[in-house]
Image (cartoon, rainbow, N blue to C red):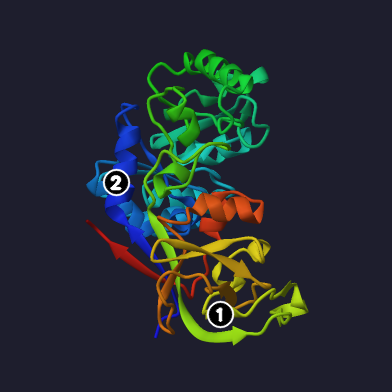
Amino acid sequence: MDLARLTVDLAALRANYRTFAGTAPGAGAVVKADGYGLGARRIAEALCQGGCVDFFVATVAEGLDLAGRVGEGRVYVFSGPMDADDAGRMAANGLTPVLNDSAQVGRWQHYRHLPAAVHVDTGMRRLGFDSRSFDPGQFDGLLVTLVLSHLANADRRGDPLSDRQAARFSALTRLFPEARTSLGNSAGVLSGIGSDVARPGIALYGGNPFSTGRSPMRPVATLEARVVGLRTVRPGEPVGYDGTFRTARKTRVAVLGIGYADGVPRAISNRGVVAHRGQRLPVIGRISMDLMHVDVTAARTPVAVGDWLEVFGHTVRVDDVAAAAGTIPYEVLTGIGSRVVRDYRDG
């Protein structure tokens, strides 16, 4: 019997994708980190059905996992070829490298007839060619089909750095008149920062792309756990490791078969909530590796062993869990453990 499951709503995923397809002429999708923890293969296949043709991953291994699974689509590898073997594998499997420095340009020279993308650093100070000392001549002879950059502060609406980055990017892309452009991430696109190929990530999966306010996206992932035990605890008794919670009254406690090994942040101990049939109920005690406690005393509908409680989904949004844990929804989704069963539903 499964104790924890992640239900992925592929119809909601495609609905979120359509939000971006309606604003960008060639909306792509970021499917790195195993599709933000939801399963890159199934995610990419569903997005292909929705019309997506541009997919972005972080590593060569992630790209190889999708090779041949996106039809006529293109798979871009953000890390680029780290050595000659990487370059050979990418060329042999139809992956498009994102070139980040002159060494990577050199590694791709042998495959100059194949498409490549160029990453320009306009303010993130991470990967990519520095926009302040950019030399377009080093790409002579290469088939550059995409030029991209990454917004550093797009999640903060109206941040002036985003406008400065967009201006720098616009100036540089004029040097590649035949290449498409890609700048807007989830928040950037929704804020009106345009380019040829949008790169939505967290918003596709139902997370809030902005640092404040409610998410404008449909929930895609629902994480649930079974009740594996019920007990009544007398007033004044400790609950869980180190007794960080002590009952103030007679308390009905449900024990769920999920813990931090499955991706529930330990930081939501004594401060998070889960849901039972649409009602939020408090997490009490320290979350342990495999189990967690929930106070179900006030549950409107009796909670029974075997019931599924929602850790996040439609009632408790993934953003709520992230806020309680002092982190971001990206970390919550990508932290879901491998023993959590994935259940894909479409429509």
Quadrant that contains the N terminus: bottom left
**Residue indicated by mark 1:** 252
Which image quarter: residue 153? top right
**Residue indicated by mark 2:** 14
| Residue drawn at 48 percent across, 75 percent down | 339
How many labels, in total?
2
Q: Position of residue 321 (x, y in %)?
A: 56, 56
Quadrant that contains the C terminus: bottom left
Residue 134 visible from this viewpoint? no
For residue 126, above or below residue 291:
above
Indicate which disc, 2 or 1, sits on the residue closer to the N terminus: 2
Q: Secondary structure at mark 2?
A: helix
Q: Amino acid at mark 2?
A: Arg
Residue 128 visible from this viewpoint? yes
Q: Position of residue 157 (x, y in %)?
A: 56, 26
Q: Choose between 217 and 233: the one closer to the eye.
A: 233
For label 2, the crowd category at 10 Å Cα-Cα, with few meaning under 14, some 14 to 19 and many 20 or more, is many
Q: Position of residue 6 (x, y in %)?
A: 41, 66
